[in-house]
Amino acid sequence: MKRTDRKYNINLPAHMAECDANYLRLQKLFPGMREDDIISFGVDINGLNFTIALRVLERGPYTTILRLTQEPAPPWSRKPSLTIRLYHDARCAEVVEYQGKRHFRAVYDYPNEDMRHPDEKAQINRFLSEYLAVCLAHGIASDETLLAN
């Protein structure tokens, strides 16, 4: 039996759609990001309460860099820390740092020195997508109104 090694290729349209959707989710969660420096809100998941903070680290005419943090750490994982760059002209958002790791390439050979998955960049942006969806579905604003509404 002959084994064929297939190299992973990024699905650019799917990746861009993910980044576009993340931009829209972040706009819903932090509509004042161009003027305000921080927003925080609660998330209730089956009786476990977390505080999510979105803090502006850098602001330019066409981009904003946010840090997303969560307190406390969930019992099943480490607390996430993501740095996200928003491109306002393109209306997309991309993770540029995750748990202190930076500079994600679109494709990695596997195995590699850091043992990153071939689609590490896509996975991190998909994680952000799912995380923001949970925030929108289960988030509670400071005035006790649901963020999803």
Image (cartoon, rainbow, N blue to C red):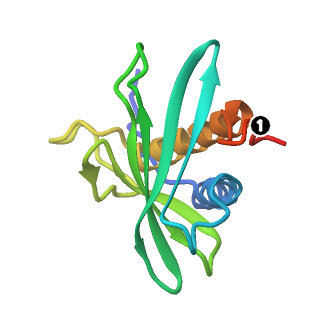
Residue count near mark 1 (Cα–Cα under 10 Å), binned few <14, some 14–19, many ≥20: some
Is 147 rendered above or below residue 25? above
Where, quadrant-wise, is the C terminus in this rendering? top right
The location of residue 12, given as percent across then percent down, is: 57, 60
**30 horizontally vs 146: left or right:** left
Residue 148 percent across, percent down from the top left = 79, 40
Q: Nearer the viewer, residue 117 or 1?
A: 117
Image quadrant holding the N terminus, namely: top left
**Quadrant of the rendered image containing residue 111:** top left
Residue at 19 percent of width and 40 percent of height: 114
Up the image or down, 74 lies above or below 83; here it is above
In this orientation, which residue lies closer to the viewer: 53 or 119?
Answer: 53
How many labels sit on residues? Answer: 1
**Which quarter of the figure has residue 137?**
top right
Q: Percent position (x, y) of residue 96?
A: 38, 58
Q: Residue furthest left?
A: 113
Figure check: 148 above or below 65: above
Q: Which amino acid lies under the numbered mark 1 shown in the image of this protein?
A: Leu
Of all residues, the one furthest to the right in this rendering is 149
- Give left or right: position of 19 versus 70: right
Q: Report the residue at 51% width, 40% height from top.
A: 52
User: For the view shown, which residue lies furthest in the bottom direction?
Assistant: 61
Q: Could you say where residue 97 lies in the image, as x and y percent from the top left?
A: 34, 53
Q: Height in image: 2 above or below 105?
A: above
Q: Which residue is mark 1?
A: 146
Residue at image location 61% in from the left, 30% down from the top: 43
Q: Secondary structure at mark 1?
A: loop
